[in-house]
Image (spheres, grey):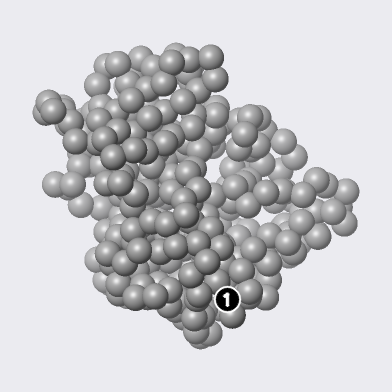
Amino acid sequence: MPALVSLHLYPIKGCAGITLAEAALGEAGLEHHGAGDREWMVVDAASGRFETQRSLPALARLVPSIDEGSLRLDAAGAPPLEVELAPSRPRALRTVTVWRHTGPALDEGDAAAAWLSARLGRAVRLVRFDPASARHAEARWTDDARVPVRFPDGFPLLVAGHASLVQVNRWLAAAGRTALPMNRFRPNLVLDGLPPFAEDALSSLEIGAAHIRPLKGCTRCGVPSIDQSTGERGPDPLDVLEDYRMDPRLGGITFGMNAIVVAGAGARLRAGDPVTAHPR
């Protein structure tokens, strides 16, 4: 039977992920100890435009962790940065842009900005999603349902199959390339027990009380070429995957499925949970 084999939370867009044994499932994605997936984001200090590993690969070297009171960010050779999950002081609003969305976000202050700017070599700010504001997944993919998101590229969840990665690594090996770990593709939920790329053709997934609907293949940028432990760019696998995974309808090379939560928000997901997968 298919199973959920791992869960991954990315509290700060573009930074390293956290592998969890269990997590809460919210409408806007995974949550842990009051921190949500892509709830924080690094932005250019002048323009407020979002930064990711596409523009700053060194974000991969910034490693978050969460306890019940703070978000901590570690980097080699530096004292950690700690950000309160329940701040004792009001924070200023800053206008930020992520893709086509522009809106307010909560600025985490000058100390966080200075820490990040020193690590990244560029003037940046750390912002948190403002719960008083709204951002939604693109309605043309959700049948006009208003699906809340924080700061992901577009959807609350990214689902990938372990067998799909195994197949990708077979193709890479045939081309003389090194195998890639799953963290190059930065999924939230990894499934096992399905054939390669079976997730592409599912109408829904049931994991306990949670009902999740895969909607759209995730078109890949250059991030899979970045070593997530070093922040260094390596051979880009997309030239190999182009022969196998180009989706003309989406105009890109796909790996994994963007998904939404259709029922069961508030449920807890655990590594090892059985999964019922419904084909289209």
Location of the N terminus (image quadrant): bottom right
Quarter of the image for residue 112 reads top left
Is residue 86 at least partly visible in the picture?
yes
Choose between 71 and 57: the one closer to the eye: 71
The x and y percentages for residue 45 are: 33, 22
Q: Callout 1, which amino acid?
A: Pro
The image position of residue 197, as x and y in percent, is 64, 71
- Above-or-below relation of 271 to 72: below
The relative height of residue 149 versus residue 111 in the rendered view (above or below) is below
Residue at the image position 36 percent from the left and 73 percent from the top:
210
The 10 Å Cα crowd at callout 1, few under 14, some 14 to 19, many 20 or more, is some
**Is 153 displayed left or right of 161 in the figure?**
left
Tell me, yes or no, if residue 151 can be seen here: no
Res. 127 image quadrant: top left
Q: Is residue 276 left or right of residue 148?
A: right
Residue beneath the point at 50% across and 76% down: 275
Please give the name of the residue rendered at 40% of the width and 64% of the height, measured from the top-left corner. Answer: 269
Q: State the count of labels.
A: 1
Depth check: give the residue in front, 146 or 40: 40
Direction from residue 144 to residue 231 in the image, left or right: right
Res 229 quadrant in image: top right
- Residue placed most toward the observer, 146 or 36: 36
Position in image of residue 200 (x %, y %): 57, 73
Q: Residue at x 56, y 63 (%)?
A: 5
Could you tell me residue 118's position as x and y percent?
44, 14
**Residue marked by disc 1:** 2
SS for dot 1: loop
Looking at this view, is 176 or 55 the one in front?
Answer: 176
